[in-house]
Amino acid sequence: MSDSIKNIDEKNGVIVISTSGYFNNVAGEAVLEIFNEKIDSGSKNFLVDMADSKVVNSIGVSILIEIIEKLQAVDGKLAFCNLAGIVEKTFNIMGLTKYCEVYDSIDSGVEKLS
Amino acid sequence: MNKTKAEVELKLPVIPDIELTATKTAEVISKHMNLSEEKTGEISMAIIESCINAFEHSKTKEIYIHFIVSKDKLTIKVKDKGIGFDKSKVEIPNIENKLNTDERKRGWGLQLITELMDTVEYDSDETGTTVTMTKKREDNE
């Protein structure tokens, strides 16, 4: 598993991907790789836990837009939890929060997505 | 708290994630200035995006970052000696235009810098680019 990924879990049909460290292009690609594996296996609901990624860049976040696009094609959902203030603000500016819910914990995200 | 004018200069080579060196410096300076956590995050994000733009588009091997602390604001200059760019040709990104189209998903740097900082100015020609951005200090900071 990539250093950018802390944990991958499945809870009530929701794939929970916990990231670690600077969310840059490497981290974005790592999430995309997991996403592609899981969506090929039939998963449609994804929660990205960014509790341990307090710093992002727009290249990494742009890769999440690819995931949103792919999920729209299968009527799936992407959500985020445990976002640092500046990360949520970045997501707002880039428009991700128009398409993805933000939750304050893994449990609340899983509850809403499942 | 010492609020007299202070300056810090960094010279960064183009190596992966080196922009985090600049954000660490920004955190120390923000703490010195007693800026809020929110402002510190905004400054760091704007620096990251400025560095990435310089690394990707200037075609140079190093960039220079100049922090200038003054009584009422923090000024940050991110400079490269690259090929320059024409800001008028940079489109304002919109996620709706990027979803389900062939448009590349990237291209958010300038928009983020503009939204996160209080002022942003670009000075660019064929000898290089300097991005000058400021964050104001409130009376209670």
Image (tube, rainbow, N blue to C red):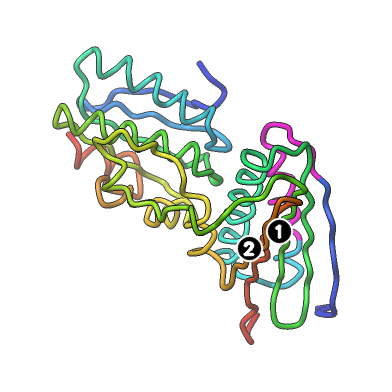
- The image shows residue A52 at horizontal and vertical percentages of 52, 39
Instruction: Please indicate whether residue A7 sits to the left or right of residue B135 in the image.
Output: left
> In which quadrant of the rendered image does the C terminus of chain B lie?
bottom right
Determine which of the numbered discs, if any, sits on residue B130 in the image: 1
Amino acid carrying mark 1 in the image: Thr
User: Are the two marked residues, 1 and 2, in contact with CB atoms closer than 8 angstroms?
Assistant: yes
Q: Residue at x 79, y 60 (%)?
A: B66
Nearest the camera: A77 or A107? A77
- Crowding around mark 1 (Cα neighbors within 10 Å: few <14, some 14 to 19, many 20+) is many
Q: Where is residue B58 drawn, in percent x and y?
A: 68, 43
- Write the start and end of the magenta stretch as one range: B12-28
* B140 or B22: nearer the viewer: B22
Please state the chain letter of the residue tagged with numbered disc 2 in the rendered image. B
Q: Residue at x 73, y 61 (%)?
A: B77
Residue B81 is inside the magenta segment:
no
Q: Which residue is labeled 2 in the image?
A: B122
Q: Position of residue B56 (x, y in %)?
A: 62, 38
- Check the picture and name the quadrant holding the N terminus of chain B: bottom right
Mark 2 surroundings within 10 Å by alpha-carbon count, few (fewer than 14), some (14 through 19), many (20 or more): some
Which chain does tag 1 point to? B
Vertical side of A77 occupied by B89: above or below? below
From what the image shows, is residue A20 above or below residue B46?
above
